[in-house]
Structures are given as structure tokens and as C-alpha cells.
Image (cartoon, helix red, strand yellow):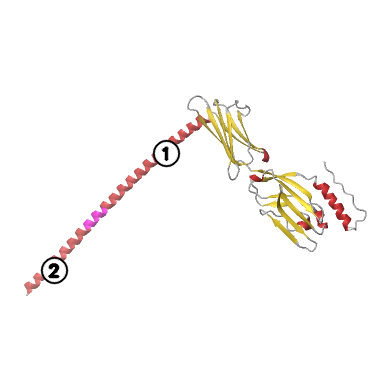
Amino acid sequence: MCLPVFCAPMCLHKRALLRAGLLLFLLHLGACLDDCVLCIVGQPVLLPCLYPELNTFGNFSIEWRKNDQKLLRSEWREDGNVEICSLNYARIPDDAAQNGNFSLELPKVHPKQDKMNFSLFFSAGENEATQLCALCLRVAASFSAPELQSEEEADGDETTFLCLSGGGYPEPVVSWLISDSLQPPEGSVRTLAEPHPESLLYNITSYLTLNISKDSSVTCIVENLSMNETLTATRYGESRTGVVGRASEAMWIFSTVLCVVVGIMVMVGVVYQIHLDRITKRRKKENREEQRGYKRKFQFIEETEAMTEDKKETDV
């Protein structure tokens, strides 16, 4: 363990001695700070670094470095002037000099930043830069819930189980269990872990091929050690036949119900069509009778008019 060595000056009112003692304190303390920060892919991360003692310095500057690359530099002066230069949208709080909070905020984390080291350096006057904070990134992302499938081999009694998961980081540990306790035989498991070319997130495909009884179960386990996350999926040997049987039974029920519904719809359609035909015939009959009535009425009017004319001629 590193212990800071700091001898307070006898005359605290002398500002130069206070700064010299404080700088000595920071030199020893900075050598002791080394930690890692776990961050999630795609989310912002804050690298903590608190030094309220720095506000006693009038002119000083800090510099955040990513590995050996300068990422952010900020300089404060006694006249209140502040200069900040930043890359990749990295930032520190606006009131960092007043509150001593020099934590670095990164807007978005990518797997390529995994295991990168970030360091904060402090310098005042002619003194050499002093490392105050040193942190590393541990990047992680959760995997999707495993999907477990099975298919029987065409030749033989063996069954191949397929475990699929993806979207996580770093590469997980994939294992299998038979009946919740037994390890699979040697050579029966084959696992492929492929990172996406751009996102670098892993897609996992694991195969287990063995002869399994119907009363046994198979469990696929995906462990993300960085996030202390364990995901499992279980499938039972008898479920393969049961699933097929239930699927066939469900298909038969569906077909029967569909046939009944179609039959009812056809019967309703036929009855409705017969009803429409009857209505059409009745209307046609009524129209014909109505036309005949008009015709008879017209003939009666013509005969009446003819008789009237004949009577007039006779009277004359």
C-alpha cells in the first residue's frame, strides 16, 4: 500500500511553502491511484478524479491522456482565463477548478476502448507534470437470452442441440449440463464466437451432439464474467417428440375447426342466396302483375273514350 508523505510547513501563511507541500502530497498520492471502471457499450461513462486541493493554485493546467494520446487539456490562470482543448467530445465539469472535480466524461463507449488506460496529469509553474489519476476501462454488454433448438440426426440415435446468443461483450464462457449436473462427453461440444466487424459485439453458436434419453434434460449456459451475468436455456429430451405431437394435434384441431367454419359459411351463403333469389322472383312477379294492371286500366280508358265518341255521333 502506498502512503502519502506530507510535512505541513510551519508557517501556513506562506503561500509558496503551502503549494510546495501540496504538490509533494499530490506526487505521492497520485502514484497510488490505479483502478478500472466498468462501462456498458453505447452508454456514457464517467472516469472519477476528485482533487479539491488544486484550487489553491493560481496558474495550473490538467491534461487527460488516453494511453499516450492527449485527449483533453485545460488551463486555468489567476486572471480567470480558462483554455480548454478536447478531442472526441470528451469533457470535464465547467466548475472543475472551483469544486476540484476533474472527472472525465466520455459520451459513448465502444468495445475497441476495452482495456484502454486513462490518466490525469497536473502541472503548475515550472514543475513537471504529475499523474494524479490513472484508470482503465472494462467494456461489457449483455448477451441476449439463449435460444435452444434441437434436431435429430438422419442416421443414428444422436441429437444435435443448438444454442444461440448474441449482442454481448466480451466473449462469454459457454458450457452445457445434462440433467442439471452431468458434464457432456468430451468432443461432443463445439462453440463458435464471432465478433461483428463494426460493433465488435459477439454472436455465439454452440453445438452439443449426443445420444440423450427422453427423460433427460439439456441446459446451455452463457456466462458474461465481466458483468457477473449468467443466462441459461433448458430443453428436455422428451419435449422433442412431445412438441411434434402437440404441433400435429394442434394442426389437426385447427384444420377441423377451419373446415367447420368454412362449411358453416358456405351453408349460410347458400341460404342467403336462396333468400335473395326468392325475393328477386317475388319482385319480378309483382312487377309483371303491376304492368298487367296498368295495361288493363289503359285498355279500359281507351274503350270508355271510344264508347263516348260513338254515343256523341249517334245523338247527332
Check disc 2: other Cα within 10 Å, few if <14, some if 14-19, many if 20+: few
Q: Position of residue 171 (x, y in %)?
A: 63, 38
Tell whether position 284 is magenta.
Answer: yes
Where does residue 140 sit, x and y in percent of width and height? 65, 43
In the rendered image, the residue lying farthest to the bottom is 316
**Residue annotated with mark 1:** 257
Q: Nearer the viewer, residue 260 or 231?
A: 231
| Above or below for 25 versus 223 | below
- Residue 69 at x, y percent in the picture: 70, 49
Q: Which span is picked out in magenta?
A: 282-289
Q: What residue lies at 85% left-to-right and 50% top-to-bottom? A: 24
Q: Which residue bears the numbered disc 2?
A: 305
Which image quarter: residue 94? Answer: bottom right
Closer to us: 116 or 96: 116
Describe the element under mark 1 as helix, strand or loop. helix
**Sequence-earlier tag: 1 or 2:** 1
- Residue depicted at x 24% and y 54%: 284
Q: Is residue 122 visible?
A: yes
